[in-house]
Image (tube, grey):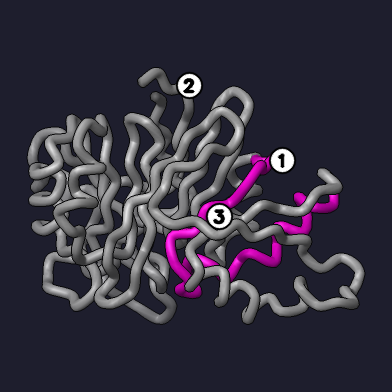
Amino acid sequence: MNYPPFTVTFLGTGTSSGVPMIGCHCEVCQSTHKKDKRLRSSILIQSETTTLVVDTTPDFRYQMLRAGVTKLDAILFTHPHKDHLAGLDDVRAFNLFSGMPMPLYCNELTEAAIRKDFFYAFSKEKYPGVPDLLPHSIGTDSFTIGDLTIEPILVWHLKMPVLGFRFGPFTYITDANRIDAVEMQKLKGSHTLVLNALRKQPHLSHFTLQEAIDIAREAGVSAAYFTHISHQLGLHSTIQKELPKGVSLAYDGLQLKF
């Protein structure tokens, strides 16, 4: 399948607390290296005609400014946790300049959270300047936005269903600790896979570093990048040296071209 050229920018690669974590004095949080500074996890997808964001983190406004984004066609959501949803109010700037509602693509669980958390955007009598949102419910069937076709991948965050997304040769999965066999098949043929790798120690709802490495090997991808990283994982420079060939830690600002 021919897929249009596109660029992926990692807007954030940190876990829910971000890195550095407030009040923490560990060596990672005290590091001055830019690759140890992690906003909450999100990516930007840009083709010649289409610009998408996956998740609106609490850092969304700054992420958009830092990446110089002035046009946004739609937002995809993985799940309704606050570190992936809380910045949604700031899409009103895009509403202002485009004069259009912002299309949102998410599962029913996430749409319900959006309608509850941002209730004022769906009221009958809207206050001037509130976000103009247009939710679209999605499941596991492929859909198209502009020139990009997206294939959702159902993964599990303990007992919560989370959506990963495949864009042709690139697959993005965050906040997961289990991928069922049927959904694993959707990863096959990807060139590049992004997975969450929270830390080395076991966690009830996130892949560990070794579990993420094992999933990447099983998927047979050429390149794997890990995101949703905690300060508990360690310094970027230290962990990167421990990783096998073809596997890397993602970092804020990293760009991949396809």
Dot 3: element: strand
Quarter-of-image position of residue 254: top left
The answer to which of marks 1 and 2 sits earlier in the sequence is 2
Dot 2: element: loop
For label 3, the residue is 105
For label 1, the residue is 70
Dot 1: element: loop
Q: Nearer the viewer, residue 127 or 233?
A: 127
For label 2, the residue is 4
Q: Nearer the viewer, residue 93 or 188?
A: 188
Say if the magenta span includes residue 151: no
Above/below status of 138 relative to 109: above
Q: Amino acid at mark 2?
A: Pro
> Can residue 148 be seen by looking at this rendering?
yes
Residue stretch in magenta: 69-96
Residue for point 25% across, 33% down? 190
Q: Amino acid at mark 1?
A: Thr
Please name which of the two marks, 1 or 3, marks the residue nearer to the observer: 3
Give percent across and percent down for residue 221: 18, 34
Above/below status of 13 relative to 231: above
Direction from residue 241 to residue 95 in the image, left or right? right
Q: Measure how far apart labels 1 and 3 are at the Cα level.
A: 20 Å
